[in-house]
Amino acid sequence: MMYSTYEPTLIAPLVLGSEDGTSLCACQFTSGRDAAKFCWDGAERSDQAPVFCQARSWLDRYFAGEAPDPTRLCLAPRGTTFQQAVWEALLTIPYGQTVTYGWVARRVSDMRGSRTSPRAVGGAVGANPIGIIVPCHRVVGADGSLTGFGGGIKAKVALLEHEGVALTGLTVPTRGTAL
């Protein structure tokens, strides 16, 4: 295991992780509800590893206002087959747009050939280990609520505003897991 960090000015610092030095398995917030979710104790810090240089370059372009293609990175998130399908669907959400958990559920249902519930999708979206790059921040509730973001609601709002998403019609929860 190896890790590096990335410090954008828009949101809290991020920890980047790789199991093998060739593919990215994590891009995690250092604050918010998921801050302690992935433990990098005992991992070797390796800021110059090519996988981290590529990820930081991607993030630099993203935070400069570009829409870099996440599929250009070698991604290897750890998860169940179902979670992998949900994360693959997240990669199809265009920059600057939001979709609902129901939309993701329909997309996964089409991919897998079996019915998928938005609630199950919500669990998989919440388990996404490669935040921002696999754009879980673009998923909102059917009622327009900005729910379920591990980096915290302020980070989700900042990322959506950064992408030019009109927040009109979207609501910020006053309590719950998104905070």
Image (spheres, helix red, strand yellow):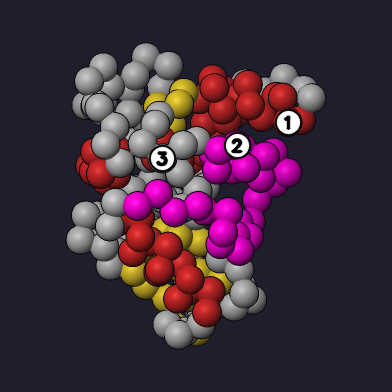
In percent of width and height, residue 174 lies at: 21, 26
Residues tagged 1 and 2 counted as in contact (Cβ below 8 A): yes
In percent of width and height, residue 21 lies at: 59, 78
Q: Which residue is mark 3?
A: 95
For the point 70% across and 24% down, the residue is 109
Reading the chain from its start, which is encountered first: label 2 or label 3? 2
Part of the protein shown in magenta: 66-92
Q: Which residue is mark 2?
A: 89
Q: Which residue is mark 1?
A: 111
Q: Determine the residue located farthest toward the right in the rendered image.
A: 113
Compared across the picture, whether 89 is left or right of 155 comes to right
Q: Determine the residue located farthest toward the top in the rendered image.
A: 143
Q: Secondary structure at mark 3?
A: loop
Give the CA separation, mark 1 to mark 2: 9 Å
For the point 73% across and 44% down, the residue is 81
Compared across the picture, whether 176 is left or right of 98 comes to left
Q: Quadrant of the N terminus?
A: bottom right
Reading the chain from its start, which is encountered first: label 3 or label 1? 3
State the image quarter where residue 168 is shown. top left
